[in-house]
Image (tube, rainbow, N blue to C red):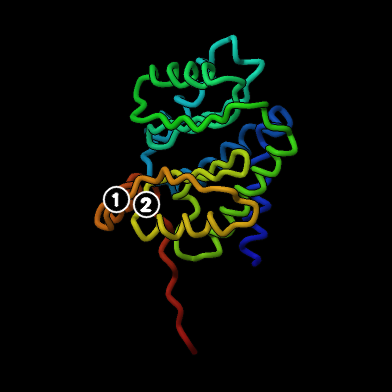
Amino acid sequence: MQKTKLFLAAATFAAALPLLQGCFPAVVAGGAAGVMSAHDRRSTGTQTDDETTEWRANNRVPDAYKQVAHVNFTSYNRRLLITGEVPTDEAKAAIEAEARKLDGVREVYNELGVGPASSLGSRSTDSFITSKVKGRLVDSNQISANHIKVVTERAIVHLLGIVSEREAKVAVDVARTTSGVKKVVKLLEVVGDDEIRRIDSQTLGTRNPPAAAAPVESR
């Protein structure tokens, strides 16, 4: 329970950062991102590419829809998820078409809803659901929450990440049993256990591994 409270507090702070730009030094956000990066199964280069893709995708939303649509882009391992709300099917198709033109994107998942843009209250609820899912992943002690990207829109939870079959099952079970969740969309990349071990060994090898625990002697 204490782990969940600490995680929810950190997640809430992280979710609020986009609303507080200019109020906090960049070093704070940079430090938090560095900690998360150290436990990511993507290479640092891929993480950078994903962030760049999100920025470029945002800039490619057609001008005709920028003021009437609520669109979010989430890139994970060069797979781009589009969520939010647009006024028409034409807008949904046009935004997807522009996203597919981006270099380096392996796949595009268009999960845009057609209808009015969600309210601030609805978006706050979505952020809270995301925090609850991440907190329950921590409490499960079966998977690192840093290996799962959780995106919630209109109470629909989308799961991205590079995971084993066992980890995928845990993540889906946690998400689908979290209060307030209406549906779970599984976009996880599921690979074999040997591949997971190789990725974990490789990513740790490119960064500073955790310090070895000191020996303990009983007296």
Vertical position of residue 168 compared to residue 189: above or below: below
Q: Position of residue 124 (x, y in %)?
A: 71, 41
Q: Position of residue 24 (x, y in %)?
A: 70, 34
Which amino acid type is marked by label 2?
Answer: Val
Compare residues 11 and 115 and report the one nearer the observer.
115
The residue wearing badge 2 is 163
Screen quadrant of the N terminus: bottom right
Say whether residue 167 is left or right of residue 89.
left
Q: Position of residue 38 (x, y in %)?
A: 45, 47
Determine which quarter of the picture holds residue 119: top right
* Mark 1 residue element: loop
Q: How many marks?
A: 2
Say whether residue 111 is left or right of residue 68.
left
Q: Which one is earlier in the sequence, the residue at label 1 or at label 2?
A: 2
Compare residues 133 and 22 and report the one nearer the observer.
133
Outermost residue toward the bottom in this view: 219
Image point (61%, 63%), residue name: 3
Distance (Cα) linking label 1 and label 2: 6 Å
Compare residues 45 and 11 and report the one nearer the observer.
11
Which amino acid type is marked by label 1?
Answer: Val
The residue wearing badge 1 is 191
* Mark 2 residue element: strand
Vertical position of residue 136 compared to residue 152: above or below: below
Q: Residues within 10 Å of mark 1 (few under 14, many from 20)?
A: few
Q: Residues within 10 Å of mark 2 (few under 14, many from 20)?
A: many
Query: Circles 1 and 2: CB distance less than 8 Å?
Result: yes
Q: Position of residue 93 (x, y in %)?
A: 47, 19
Outermost residue toward the top in this view: 63
Say whether residue 66 is left or right of residue 172.
right
Image point (30%, 53%), residue name: 196
Image point (65%, 65%), residue name: 2
